[in-house]
Image (tube, rainbow, N blue to C red):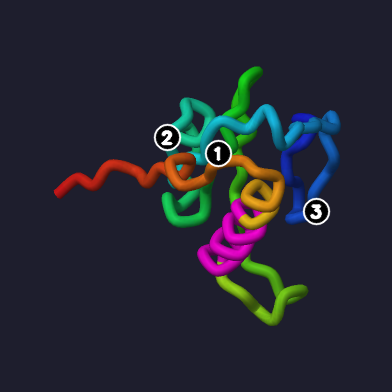
Amino acid sequence: SQEGAFSNNTPSLGSIRKVSLTDIVGIELGQKTVALKRLQSVRESECFSILTTTGTLDLQCVSSSDVGGASAEDVRKACLDYLTSVLSSNNVEVGTMLSSPARTN
């Protein structure tokens, strides 16, 4: 079993990672990074990546009964709304930070 991987739907903690708000340079929606593209079972609408000056933090949102049965997409929207609110209140320009995945036909 890999550290940080899920087994029997029970999350295990990997190494703790910290991201300073001042290091965030962008947020990408969807599976844009190599790591997220490798995951076949992940939907585009569940993922986002926080781009920093030192690397990328890839996140997959999941539905949860803890938040009233919210869908993974609703959880992602709530996370992004909160993150952009916090960044804005810390005088970080977020208008150009969000990047949606390219649409293909």
Q: Earlier in the sequence, mark 3 or mark 2?
A: 3
Distance Cα–Cα, label 3 vs label 2:
26 Å
- Report the magenta stretch's main SS: helix
The answer to whether any part of residue 46 appears in the image is yes
> Can you name the residue that lies furthest to the left here?
105
Q: Which mark is residue 82?
A: none
Q: Height in image: 28 above or below 45? A: above
The answer to whether any part of residue 1 appears in the image is no
Q: Residues within 10 Å of mark 1 (few under 14, many from 20)?
A: many
Q: Which mark is residue 10?
A: 3
Cβ atoms under marks 1 and 2 closer than 8 Å: yes
Q: Is residue 78 magenta?
A: yes
Magenta stretch bounds: 72-84
Amino acid on which disc 1 is placed? Ser
Q: Which mark is residue 49?
A: 1
Distance Cα–Cα, label 1 vs label 2:
8 Å
> Which secondary structure lies at badge 2?
loop
Tell me the residue at 63%/32% (across/down). Answer: 24
Q: Residues within 10 Å of mark 3 (few under 14, many from 20)?
A: few
Q: Residues within 10 Å of mark 2 (few under 14, many from 20)?
A: some
Tell me the residue at 80%/53% (across/down). Answer: 10
Q: Which mark is residue 32?
A: 2
Cβ atoms under marks 1 and 3 closer than 8 Å: no
Closer-to-camera residue (46/5): 46
Q: Is residue 75 magenta?
A: yes
> Which secondary structure lies at badge 3?
loop
> Can you name the residue that lies furthest to the bottom here?
68
Tell me the residue at 65%/18% (across/down). Answer: 54
Closer-to-camera residue (27/90): 90
| Left or right: 78 as drawn, with respect to 12 | left
Q: Earlier in the sequence, mark 1 or mark 3?
A: 3
